[in-house]
Image (tube, helix red, strand yellow):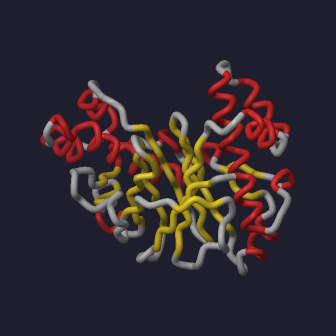
Amino acid sequence: MKPDTPDALHDFTPADAPPALPAADEIHVWTVPLDPPPERVASLARLLAADEAARAARFRFARHRRRYTVGRGALRTLLARYLGADPAALAFRYGGNEKPYLASPSAAAAAAGGAALQFNLSNSEELAVIAVVVGTEVGADVERLRPMQDALAISQRFFSAAERRVLAGVPEAQRDRTFFHCWTRKEAYLKAVGTGITVPLDRFDVTLAPGDAPRMLAMDGSAERAAGWHLYHLEPAAGYLGAVAIHGGGGWRLRGWRWTG
Protein backbone atom coordinates (compact mmCIF):
# COMPACT_ATOMS: atom_id res chain seq x y z
CA MET A 1 0.00 0.00 0.00
CA LYS A 2 1.02 3.61 -0.49
CA PRO A 3 2.28 5.54 2.55
CA ASP A 4 -0.27 7.78 4.16
CA THR A 5 -0.07 11.51 3.47
CA PRO A 6 -1.82 14.29 5.43
CA ASP A 7 -4.74 14.28 2.99
CA ALA A 8 -5.05 10.53 2.37
CA LEU A 9 -5.38 7.34 4.38
CA HIS A 10 -4.35 3.97 2.98
CA ASP A 11 -3.39 1.88 6.00
CA PHE A 12 -5.93 0.40 8.41
CA THR A 13 -4.72 -1.53 11.45
CA PRO A 14 -6.81 -4.52 12.59
CA ALA A 15 -8.53 -3.77 15.91
CA ASP A 16 -11.69 -4.75 17.77
CA ALA A 17 -12.02 -1.53 19.79
CA PRO A 18 -10.86 2.10 19.65
CA PRO A 19 -7.79 2.93 21.71
CA ALA A 20 -9.35 6.17 23.01
CA LEU A 21 -11.67 8.97 21.98
CA PRO A 22 -10.45 10.98 18.99
CA ALA A 23 -8.18 13.86 19.95
CA ALA A 24 -9.35 17.35 19.03
CA ASP A 25 -7.43 17.21 15.74
CA GLU A 26 -8.12 13.56 14.85
CA ILE A 27 -10.52 11.79 12.52
CA HIS A 28 -10.90 8.11 13.30
CA VAL A 29 -11.83 6.01 10.28
CA TRP A 30 -12.97 2.41 10.58
CA THR A 31 -13.47 -0.07 7.77
CA VAL A 32 -16.01 -2.81 8.44
CA PRO A 33 -16.26 -5.98 6.33
CA LEU A 34 -19.96 -6.68 5.86
CA ASP A 35 -19.69 -10.43 5.24
CA PRO A 36 -18.77 -11.97 8.62
CA PRO A 37 -19.81 -15.53 9.60
CA PRO A 38 -23.56 -16.08 10.14
CA GLU A 39 -23.19 -16.37 13.91
CA ARG A 40 -21.58 -12.94 14.02
CA VAL A 41 -24.39 -11.48 11.92
CA ALA A 42 -26.92 -12.93 14.36
CA SER A 43 -25.03 -11.49 17.32
CA LEU A 44 -24.98 -8.01 15.77
CA ALA A 45 -28.66 -8.26 14.86
CA ARG A 46 -29.51 -8.58 18.55
CA LEU A 47 -28.05 -5.11 19.16
CA LEU A 48 -30.42 -3.32 16.80
CA ALA A 49 -33.28 -1.16 17.99
CA ALA A 50 -36.81 -1.99 16.88
CA ASP A 51 -36.82 0.57 14.07
CA GLU A 52 -33.49 -0.72 12.76
CA ALA A 53 -34.67 -4.34 12.86
CA ALA A 54 -37.83 -3.31 11.01
CA ARG A 55 -35.82 -1.54 8.35
CA ALA A 56 -33.56 -4.57 7.94
CA ALA A 57 -36.61 -6.77 7.49
CA ARG A 58 -37.87 -4.59 4.64
CA PHE A 59 -34.90 -5.38 2.43
CA ARG A 60 -35.95 -7.79 -0.29
CA PHE A 61 -32.64 -9.61 -0.64
CA ALA A 62 -30.82 -11.40 2.17
CA ARG A 63 -27.44 -9.89 1.29
CA HIS A 64 -28.87 -6.37 1.70
CA ARG A 65 -30.38 -7.29 5.08
CA ARG A 66 -27.03 -8.72 6.16
CA ARG A 67 -25.06 -5.65 5.05
CA TYR A 68 -27.40 -3.25 6.81
CA THR A 69 -27.46 -5.36 9.98
CA VAL A 70 -23.68 -5.68 10.19
CA GLY A 71 -23.10 -2.00 9.45
CA ARG A 72 -25.51 -0.79 12.11
CA GLY A 73 -24.36 -3.39 14.62
CA ALA A 74 -20.74 -2.41 14.08
CA LEU A 75 -21.62 1.28 14.43
CA ARG A 76 -23.37 0.60 17.73
CA THR A 77 -20.49 -1.51 18.99
CA LEU A 78 -17.81 1.04 18.13
CA LEU A 79 -19.71 4.04 19.51
CA ALA A 80 -20.46 2.14 22.71
CA ARG A 81 -16.79 1.32 23.16
CA TYR A 82 -15.85 4.96 22.68
CA LEU A 83 -18.40 5.97 25.30
CA GLY A 84 -18.19 3.06 27.72
CA ALA A 85 -21.85 2.23 27.07
CA ASP A 86 -24.07 -0.73 26.19
CA PRO A 87 -24.32 -0.91 22.37
CA ALA A 88 -27.93 -2.12 22.51
CA ALA A 89 -28.88 0.82 24.75
CA LEU A 90 -27.69 3.55 22.40
CA ALA A 91 -30.49 5.61 20.89
CA PHE A 92 -30.25 7.62 17.69
CA ARG A 93 -32.09 10.66 16.42
CA TYR A 94 -32.10 11.62 12.76
CA GLY A 95 -31.40 14.95 11.11
CA GLY A 96 -31.63 16.00 7.49
CA ASN A 97 -31.63 13.15 5.00
CA GLU A 98 -31.80 10.72 7.97
CA LYS A 99 -28.28 11.52 9.13
CA PRO A 100 -27.91 9.78 12.51
CA TYR A 101 -26.84 11.44 15.75
CA LEU A 102 -26.70 10.12 19.28
CA ALA A 103 -30.06 10.88 20.90
CA SER A 104 -28.41 11.69 24.24
CA PRO A 105 -25.77 14.24 23.25
CA SER A 106 -25.19 15.26 26.85
CA ALA A 107 -23.98 11.78 27.77
CA ALA A 108 -21.84 11.62 24.64
CA ALA A 109 -20.45 15.07 25.35
CA ALA A 110 -19.61 14.16 28.91
CA ALA A 111 -17.66 11.15 27.71
CA ALA A 112 -15.97 13.25 25.02
CA GLY A 113 -14.84 16.00 27.38
CA GLY A 114 -17.72 18.39 26.75
CA ALA A 115 -18.01 18.15 22.95
CA ALA A 116 -20.43 15.86 21.21
CA LEU A 117 -19.17 12.72 19.50
CA GLN A 118 -20.00 12.94 15.79
CA PHE A 119 -19.94 10.12 13.27
CA ASN A 120 -21.01 9.02 9.82
CA LEU A 121 -21.48 5.64 8.15
CA SER A 122 -21.29 4.70 4.49
CA ASN A 123 -21.33 1.34 2.76
CA SER A 124 -20.85 -0.11 -0.70
CA GLU A 125 -21.14 -3.78 -1.60
CA GLU A 126 -19.30 -5.69 1.16
CA LEU A 127 -17.54 -2.82 2.91
CA ALA A 128 -18.62 -0.06 5.28
CA VAL A 129 -16.65 2.98 6.44
CA ILE A 130 -17.34 4.76 9.72
CA ALA A 131 -15.79 8.17 10.49
CA VAL A 132 -15.73 9.42 14.11
CA VAL A 133 -14.71 12.85 15.41
CA VAL A 134 -15.37 15.09 18.40
CA GLY A 135 -17.21 18.37 18.12
CA THR A 136 -17.81 18.98 14.40
CA GLU A 137 -19.85 17.63 11.51
CA VAL A 138 -18.27 14.85 9.47
CA GLY A 139 -19.33 12.91 6.40
CA ALA A 140 -17.93 9.77 4.80
CA ASP A 141 -18.51 7.96 1.54
CA VAL A 142 -17.15 4.72 0.09
CA GLU A 143 -17.63 3.16 -3.33
CA ARG A 144 -16.52 -0.08 -4.91
CA LEU A 145 -14.41 0.65 -7.97
CA ARG A 146 -16.13 -0.73 -11.04
CA PRO A 147 -16.31 -0.05 -14.78
CA MET A 148 -18.40 3.03 -15.53
CA GLN A 149 -19.11 3.00 -19.26
CA ASP A 150 -21.59 5.83 -18.69
CA ALA A 151 -19.27 7.98 -16.54
CA LEU A 152 -19.31 10.89 -18.97
CA ALA A 153 -23.11 10.75 -19.32
CA ILE A 154 -23.58 10.69 -15.54
CA SER A 155 -21.17 13.59 -15.16
CA GLN A 156 -23.36 15.67 -17.48
CA ARG A 157 -26.20 15.31 -14.96
CA PHE A 158 -24.35 15.68 -11.68
CA PHE A 159 -20.90 17.28 -12.05
CA SER A 160 -20.02 20.92 -12.47
CA ALA A 161 -18.78 22.21 -15.83
CA ALA A 162 -15.20 22.35 -14.54
CA GLU A 163 -15.39 18.80 -13.21
CA ARG A 164 -16.83 17.53 -16.48
CA ARG A 165 -13.90 19.04 -18.38
CA VAL A 166 -11.39 17.33 -16.08
CA LEU A 167 -13.13 13.96 -16.36
CA ALA A 168 -13.35 14.15 -20.15
CA GLY A 169 -9.68 15.03 -20.36
CA VAL A 170 -8.17 12.14 -18.40
CA PRO A 171 -6.98 8.99 -20.21
CA GLU A 172 -9.71 6.40 -20.51
CA ALA A 173 -7.74 3.98 -18.32
CA GLN A 174 -7.99 6.46 -15.44
CA ARG A 175 -11.54 7.61 -16.00
CA ASP A 176 -13.33 5.24 -13.61
CA ARG A 177 -11.07 6.14 -10.68
CA THR A 178 -11.33 9.85 -11.53
CA PHE A 179 -15.12 9.59 -11.64
CA PHE A 180 -15.22 8.02 -8.19
CA HIS A 181 -12.78 10.59 -6.79
CA CYS A 182 -15.37 13.21 -7.68
CA TRP A 183 -18.40 11.21 -6.63
CA THR A 184 -17.12 10.18 -3.19
CA ARG A 185 -15.85 13.67 -2.34
CA LYS A 186 -19.18 15.22 -3.25
CA GLU A 187 -21.16 12.57 -1.39
CA ALA A 188 -18.97 12.90 1.72
CA TYR A 189 -19.68 16.64 1.83
CA LEU A 190 -23.43 16.15 1.35
CA LYS A 191 -23.49 13.52 4.09
CA ALA A 192 -21.61 15.87 6.42
CA VAL A 193 -24.24 18.58 6.01
CA GLY A 194 -27.06 16.02 6.02
CA THR A 195 -28.68 17.01 2.74
CA GLY A 196 -27.89 14.04 0.48
CA ILE A 197 -28.42 14.55 -3.23
CA THR A 198 -31.35 16.92 -2.57
CA VAL A 199 -28.67 19.60 -3.09
CA PRO A 200 -27.54 19.66 -6.74
CA LEU A 201 -24.08 18.12 -7.08
CA ASP A 202 -23.10 20.71 -9.65
CA ARG A 203 -23.42 23.54 -7.10
CA PHE A 204 -19.91 22.94 -5.79
CA ASP A 205 -16.54 21.95 -7.25
CA VAL A 206 -13.99 19.44 -5.98
CA THR A 207 -10.64 18.24 -7.24
CA LEU A 208 -10.74 14.91 -9.06
CA ALA A 209 -7.76 14.63 -11.41
CA PRO A 210 -5.30 11.81 -10.65
CA GLY A 211 -2.55 13.14 -8.41
CA ASP A 212 -4.48 16.21 -7.25
CA ALA A 213 -4.90 16.55 -3.48
CA PRO A 214 -8.55 16.22 -2.39
CA ARG A 215 -9.96 19.70 -1.96
CA MET A 216 -13.17 21.68 -2.13
CA LEU A 217 -12.57 24.35 -4.76
CA ALA A 218 -15.75 26.42 -4.76
CA MET A 219 -19.33 26.50 -3.48
CA ASP A 220 -21.77 28.34 -5.72
CA GLY A 221 -18.71 29.85 -7.38
CA SER A 222 -17.19 31.08 -4.11
CA ALA A 223 -13.73 29.82 -3.11
CA GLU A 224 -14.15 31.58 0.25
CA ARG A 225 -17.24 29.53 1.15
CA ALA A 226 -15.42 26.33 0.19
CA ALA A 227 -12.39 27.14 2.34
CA GLY A 228 -14.09 26.04 5.55
CA TRP A 229 -14.38 22.47 4.33
CA HIS A 230 -11.63 19.88 4.19
CA LEU A 231 -11.62 16.69 2.12
CA TYR A 232 -9.56 13.55 2.66
CA HIS A 233 -9.05 10.59 0.36
CA LEU A 234 -9.48 6.99 1.52
CA GLU A 235 -8.18 3.71 0.10
CA PRO A 236 -10.09 1.53 2.58
CA ALA A 237 -9.63 -1.88 0.92
CA ALA A 238 -8.62 -3.42 -2.38
CA GLY A 239 -11.14 -2.40 -5.01
CA TYR A 240 -12.69 0.43 -2.97
CA LEU A 241 -12.05 4.12 -2.52
CA GLY A 242 -13.73 6.81 -0.48
CA ALA A 243 -13.59 10.24 1.07
CA VAL A 244 -14.15 12.09 4.32
CA ALA A 245 -15.44 15.66 4.52
CA ILE A 246 -15.16 17.75 7.67
CA HIS A 247 -15.91 21.35 8.54
CA GLY A 248 -13.74 23.79 10.41
CA GLY A 249 -10.13 24.11 11.37
CA GLY A 250 -7.49 22.31 9.40
CA GLY A 251 -4.54 20.00 9.81
CA TRP A 252 -6.71 17.04 10.75
CA ARG A 253 -4.86 13.78 11.45
CA LEU A 254 -6.45 10.63 10.05
CA ARG A 255 -6.09 7.33 11.92
CA GLY A 256 -7.44 4.14 10.42
CA TRP A 257 -8.47 0.72 11.70
CA ARG A 258 -10.08 -2.37 10.20
CA TRP A 259 -12.74 -3.57 12.63
CA THR A 260 -12.30 -7.18 13.65
CA GLY A 261 -15.36 -7.26 15.90
Q: Nearer the viewer, residue 231 or 77?
A: 77
Q: Is residue 89 left or right of residue 151?
A: right
Residue at image coords 45%, 73%: 252
Residue at image coords 27%, 55%: 207
Residue 114: % across, % down: 72, 79
Q: Nearer the viewer, residue 162 or 146?
A: 146
Q: Nearer the viewer, residue 249 or 214?
A: 214
Residue 63: % across, % down: 63, 26
Quadrant location of the N terminus in the rendered image: bottom left
Residue lying furthest top: 60
Residue 50: % across, % down: 85, 38
Residue 57, image quadrant? top right
Vertical arrangement, residue 197 with respect to residue 211, above or below = above
Q: Is residue 212 left or right of residue 107?
A: left
Residue 233: % across, % down: 38, 57
Q: Is residue 219 left or right of residue 138?
A: left
Vertical arrangement, residue 63 with respect to residue 19, above or below = above
Q: Is residue 114 left or right of residue 157?
A: right
